[in-house]
Amino acid sequence: MAEKSFKYVILGGGVAAGYAAREFAKQGVHPGELAIISKEAVAPYERPALSKAYLFPEGAARLPGFHVCVGSGGERLLPEWYKEKGIELILSTEIVKADLPANTLVSATGETFKYQILIIATGSTVIKLTDFGVQGADAKNIFYLREIDDADKLVEAIKAKKNGKAVIVGGGYIGLELGAALKINNLDVSMVYPEPWCMPRLFTSGIAAFYEGYYANKGIKIIKGTVAVGFTSNSNGEVKEVQLKDGRVLEADIVVVGVGGRPLTALFKGQVEEEKGGIKTDAFFKTSVPTVYAVGDVATFPLKLYNELRRVEHVDHARKSAEQAVKAIKGLEKGQSVDKYDYLPYFYSRSFDLAWQFYGDNVGDTVLFGDNNPQSPKPKFGSYWIKDGKVVGAFLEGGSAEENQAIAKVAKLQPKAENLDALTKEGLAFACKI
């Protein structure tokens, strides 16, 4: 097999890869210097669309509409863009071996790729129920959502099982967004999760109560405190029932599982320093191997604001960390200094007519303010997290662009707030005056 050599290789073809490529083009890259190696068959795209507009029954998003970098208001990088810039897109190519001391990657078909600098942007893979040996979890029409192929299969099933019954396993990001998407497609939706409320990694019980109430009003059945322990299928091998740990059995034509992900770091085990489940990097996303950088989901990096190492799984960090790594790589070449990565954690979601944003850290005491009645025609409410007398995190549902900017500013500046009752009364006004 022929060997290909590049100055820079980005391994992974998701959001981070696309934003890194754009930054390379901005900083100056010669034709033939940069390659993106991806196991997906399409150029980098904005992955969040898959759980939202891609599944709409009408006016659904389709490629090339959501290639990067449209998700952040940037230029849409079509496959032709990479060609024009002399960036090689090596698609449908799975790398099965990484030899970092030899600066070499090997594909499943035996191709060898050499690099001078590697950016690991492999992202995460979904955790599957088959990983835990759940009985019948390999039945047809049990779906996971990570890549465009997964979304295409789900779209086909939605069409085939018109007005059928759907069961969502998991109450996190994917569970909530897909619960809404399947309901919009007129499916009878049930959500099952073991925790006492949805999105427990971020939501307080007060925030979660609103979304659970809102979803219930839309006709979604919410079953908490239990898990799926088995599936039965029909003679075609298609799922027909979900067995729950509490003994209940749910009919199902479609099952979507969203029980978390894990960073794709196995190729690099023992070759780079790891921490907190990811590849340890500095503030420029350089790993313990000087020619190797890691960005997005796989990177455990110094979060300057909180003076600790963190791993962040979110599209905003995927974009920004990719840009930071490229700035650092090019800065080193040009002898220019680059500021340390100074990230403000940011999460958001949209479902039905709802849209929330969160900034900062969800630690300490909390207050809930505003109109969080699920029956309200236009609900608008939020929460602050207060630690050591300072506001360290802020959440807002139904905010305007200006209001969302205000809560971001609060999370960044961490103003004092000694009196929680006064903060509750003041609510959003507290953020808007900062």
Image (cartoon, helix red, strand yellow):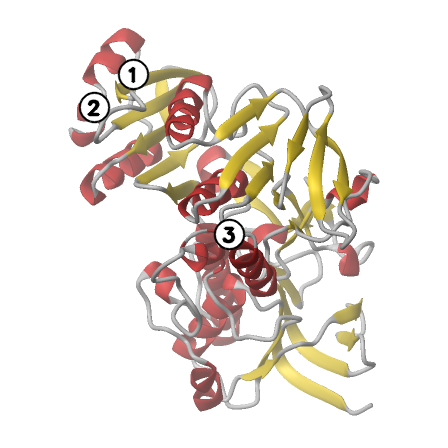
User: Which circle's residue, 2 or 3, is located before the other in the chain?
Assistant: 3
Gap between marks 2 and 1, in whole Å?
Answer: 10 Å
Determine the image quadrant of residue 410. Answer: top left
- Which sits earlier in the primary sequence, circle 2 or circle 1? 1
Give coordinates of residue 296: x percent, y percent: 55, 54
Pointer 1 with pointer 3, Cβ within 8 A: no
Give yes or no for contact between labels 2 and 3 (Cβ–Cβ under 8 Å).
no
Going by the numbered disc 2, the residue's amino acid type is Phe
The answer to which of 390 and 71 lies nearer the viewer is 71
Q: Residue at x 49, y 73 (%)?
A: 21
**Residue highlighted by disc 2:** 430
Quarter of the rendering occupied by the N terminus: bottom right
CB of mark 2 within 8 Å of CB of mark 1?
yes
Residue at horizontal 80 percent and vertical 69 percent from the top: 96
Looking at numbered disc 3 in the image, what kind of residue is underneath it? Lys
Q: Work out whether mark 1 precedes mark 3 in sequence or the reverse, and give the earlier one.
A: 3
- Would you say 6 lies left or right of 30 here? right
For residue 418, what is the image quadrant? top left
Q: Position of residue 15 (x, y in %)?
A: 50, 62
Q: Which residue is mark 1?
A: 417
Structural crowding at the residue carrying mark 1, measured as other residues with C-alpha within 10 Å and reported as few (<14), some (14–19) or many (≥20): some
- Disc 1/disc 3 C-alpha distance (Å): 52 Å
Residue 320, compared with residue 353, is above or below; it is below
On the question of residue 311 being in view, the answer is no
Regarding mark 2 in the picture, which secondary structure is present there? helix
Q: Circle 3 sits on which residue?
A: 162
* Mark 2 Cα shell of 10 Å, populated few (<14), some (14-19), many (≥20): some
Give the vertical position of 220 relative to 373 (above or below). below
